[in-house]
Image: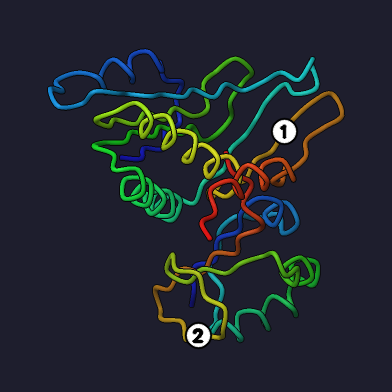
Amino acid sequence: MIRLVSQPFDPGEALAGFCRGRSETGAIASFTGLARAEAGQTTLLELEAYPGFTEREIGRHEAAAVARFGLQDVLILHRTGPIPPGEAIVFVATAAAHRRAAFEACDFLMDYLKSRAPFWKKETGPDGARWIEPTERDRDDLARWETS
Amino acid sequence: MARVLLFGRLADVAGWRERDIPARTLGELRGWIATEDPALFEALQAPAVRTAVDQSLVSLDVDLGPDSEVAFLPPMSGG
């Protein structure tokens, strides 16, 4: 499940909720991404989504991860709007019978979310605001998952 | 009439995010923008800008209905 959230959320609470009531899950992996201050260069991060479109595109990749890694369940929380340094931007949790699938699927989903998910990101710092586009590093991370 | 949505830097270029534009096709819509807002039209020409009609990506000209939603999407940055 993917949910866009416009208010701060508690990743610990999200993880605890995701772990509850499972008797066939052997492994849960999770990742939390926080907004970085970049040594004072970023005072505010703003994420714009296209409601409906953004969830559907992420949902397609979530379904791909479920099929590829044999997941039992996925939870993705993604912030939108203004996000000050230190707050969680993204939370991904994956549930599987065994740990390898859970770890790898979490990594796979984060590489997608960081590089190609339908968000538009603006950083504000002492020199003003600028729109950010994916880096070469993000593209390389994504290329790790290409199957020949 | 189509509801047009701009994202990311495109909204900064245009000075608006959402408005109705009279057009029966995507081509007509682009023509209207070319006349009314050349700066936005130029920004839309970048090959990395994608177009969605009713939340589906399109690459050719398409007809627009009275309730169509057209979104112009600059390169997606990820979260």
**Residue A99 location, x and y as percent?**
34, 26
Residue A46 appears in which quarter of the rendering? top right
**Residue A11 against residue A121 in the figure, above or below:** above
**Residue A10 location, x and y as percent?**
40, 15
Q: Residue furthest front?
A: A148
Q: Disc 2: which chain?
A: B
**Residue A63 against residue A45 in the figure, above or below:** below
Q: Residue furthest right?
A: A127
Q: Is residue B9 or residue A97 the one in the foreground?
A: A97
According to the image, label 1 marks what residue? A123
Task: Check the image and tell me how it is coloured.
Answer: rainbow
Q: Is residue A54 or residue A143 the one in the foreground?
A: A143
Crowding at mark 2 (Cα within 10 Å: few <14, some 14-19, many 20+)? few
Amino acid type assigned to the residue bearing label 1 in the image: Glu
Amino acid type assigned to the residue bearing label 2 in the image: Val
Q: Residue at x 58, y 39 (%)?
A: A114
**Residue A84 against residue B26 in the figure, above or below:** above
Q: Disc 1: which chain?
A: A
Q: Is residue A18 or residue B64 the one in the foreground?
A: A18
Q: Is residue B2 or residue A62 the one in the foreground?
A: A62
Crowding at mark 1 (Cα within 10 Å: few <14, some 14-19, many 20+)? some
According to the image, label 2 marks what residue? B62
Mark 1 and mark 2, same subunit?
A: no
**What is the quadrant of the C terminus of chain B in the image?**
top right
**Residue A139 location, x and y as percent?**
67, 48
Give the total of numbered labels.
2
Under circle 1, the secondary element is strand
A71 sits to left or right of A124: left
A122 sits to left or right of B64: right
**Residue A45 location, x and y as percent?**
65, 29
